[in-house]
Amino acid sequence: MVGHIPEETSSFVGRKAELARLAAALGSERLVTLTGAGGVGKTRLALRAAAHAAPRYPDGVWWADLSPLDGDRLLLATVSDAVDLLEHTPGIPVEDLCEWLGDKRLLLVLDSCEHLVEPCRHLVGDLLMTAPGLTLLITSRQPLELPRERVIAVPPLAPDGPDALALFTQRAKMAAPGCSFEAVEEHAAARALCQRLEGIPLSLELAAAQVTRRSAADLHDRLVSRLDVLEHSERVWPQRHQTLRTAIGWSHGLCTPAERLLWARLSVFRDRFDAAWVHAVCADGQLPADAVRGALSGLLVKSVLSRDGDGYRMLDTLREYGAEWLRATGEDTVLADRHAEHFLGLARQAEAGWLSIDQVSWYGRISHAHTELCAALDHLLVTRPIRALELAGLVGYFWSCCGRLRQARDYLERALALCQTPSQERTRGLWALGVTLTLQGEYTAARDISDRCAIAARDSRDDEARLAAAYLAGLSSLLRGEPLTARVLTGHALASIPGQPFDSASRLRCHLAHVFALTAVGRLPEARTEALRLRAGCAEIGEYWTRAYVEHQLALIALLSNRPREAAEHARAMLSGKEQMGDSFGIALGLDLLAAAIAAQGDGEQAALVYGVGQAYWRTVGDAEQGTLEVRAVRAEFERAARAAAGDVAYEAAFERGARADTQAALAITLAPER
């Protein structure tokens, strides 16, 4: 299936009328907004409706969860990421997104917009104007108030209807598989609970989780008594949310002290979190590790938390409640500090593990922690800028390699502006920013940053910093079309700082840039010898990033040496490595070389298909003209050869099939070895 929507993790109950209204609205309108109070079930309804509507959208259904965003700084990046548009261009983000969506027929769901109504209004307005095939489904506690917005209010389930009762009893049986509501008293108590909780799905689920401890009748008596007290004491939320508020408060009151404290502390996480993070951030003398384990289990049983893979998730409504309690305890700043320090530590470990068998795993872990890393950076920029600069410098390279260039650049520029004093962190930050600017194609600005990084590295007398600066200078020179300069700079650094290629990550990257430069200046035998040496070393330690780019160079060398079958083998090896790291930029480069190798073997139609798949990947990174000059020249030459072999009509048809295909499925077919 093209697109991405989250999986439903529990049964869907009722809502037939709402689903019918929503299906009709999506069939006739381009902007549909589901409104309603927190906990009423807007997200679940949108999820079910989007899945049902998917066959109508040839370019898929795509889901962007905005609930983790604290402000609008990452709004465009989140939406772009949700539709598989990466960030390799320095252009205006909203224009890039509009262009990316311009010719597509898809459904985009923006979930939880209520805290970003104004920026979402502007973004949605721009998208609707420039992407005529786009349909938007919004969930929010209030409408966006745009022209032709179809607003569908999502009410609670009818309190005395069958759906509310079905939801409560289903969830209760999940919590306590042996429970039954066949007895008259239990059935009547369950119905009364649904009425007292006004049919609000979240309230019903929280109540159902308590059936493990008591009967429905006992639960009803205790709930009614507790709600009567809470409704007179808790007036923080608007009146229309009072029943939900008091139901959450009742559930909170049934928690143990450790569970209540953990609930509050967990609100520091913006998104999905795992047990290791919880222990690192939330455990202390007041809440020891054993208590954390028990409290996690308790909150899961009480439906305050839900399972998400091997981690946990908390609904934003429950997170808001926990955040209020955290502020009331006076621990909010302390927890934010702990959170930031933990994720800074994670980034340090990732950097230390880059040159190891765990390299691919670290890319995955940094990607998984993306939202929390942004939260840590936001906090540190205000409280400890030098720590923010260190963190941005550490994750900037991971982000740049996987397409998050704008975010890397934004955080690095902000942190560098706050930290002007020379330091190891500042040198590393300049290096990461230089790489980011180079990959964005901002070569003039990148050269300036590269020069500043080289001066800082020289003044620091740090060999690792000097090798890193030489790599940056070589990379920048290569992409500017100055391979001789790149060869001289990288060669000088490697000669003046003796060592072996795998002594450090900076040295290995410098060796790689040197291989690129040797190829570009036509010293192919020398480049091949060095590339084979690096590939063997990478295979020995299980390193993927460098090995994939070494395979790229071996493919290019083979192609330039008239060995197209060998070139295709190396290109497929590169693509396999880049696929594991989620590097769309590297995949696009590899597909271009594979297509050229296929064209060189005379199969113009298959080459056109692969060029089309490559074009689809280039579009995700926003630029089909990146890469070194010799790679661009190879593409142009073999595109002409493929067109000549296939004929214009067949070439265009095959290219279009590749360009319109689901990229992941097409890549899997492309990676299959030649028969």
Image: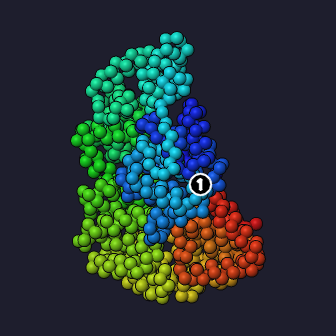
Figure colour scheme: rainbow
Closest to the observer: 635 or 220?
A: 220
Q: Name the side, left or right, on which 137 lies relative to 117.
A: right
| Residue for point 50% across, 29% down | 157
Residue lying at the far front of the rendered structure: 147
Coordinates of residue 54 in the picture (x, y in percent): 62, 48
Determine the image quadrant of residue 496: bottom left
| Residue for point 42% across, 22% down | 196
Q: How many marks?
A: 1
Closest to the observer: 62 or 153?
A: 153
Residue 174 vertical position relative to residue 186 in the rendered view, above or below: below
Q: Specify whether residue 502 is in view.
A: no
Residue 568 vertical position relative to residue 144 in the rendered view, above or below: below
Coordinates of residue 94 in the picture (x, y in percent): 46, 63
Label 1, residues with CA under 10 Å away: few <14, some 14-19, many ≥20: many
Under circle 1, the secondary element is: strand
Write down the residue under mark 1.
106
Residue 338 vertical position relative to residue 171 in the rendered view, above or below: below
Q: Specify whether residue 409 is in view.
A: yes
Q: Amino acid at mark 1?
A: Leu
Coordinates of residue 544 in the picture (x, y in percent): 53, 65
Residue lying at the far top of the rendered structure: 184
Residue 598 vertical position relative to residue 12 in the rendered view, above or below: below
- Indicate the quadrant containing the C terminus: top left, top right, bottom left or bottom right: bottom right
| Residue for point 57% across, 88% down | 522
| Residue for point 28% across, 69% down | 417
Q: Name the side, left or right, on which 18 lies relative to 200.
A: right
Coordinates of residue 95 in the picture (x, y in percent): 48, 66
Determine the image quadrant of residue 91: bottom left
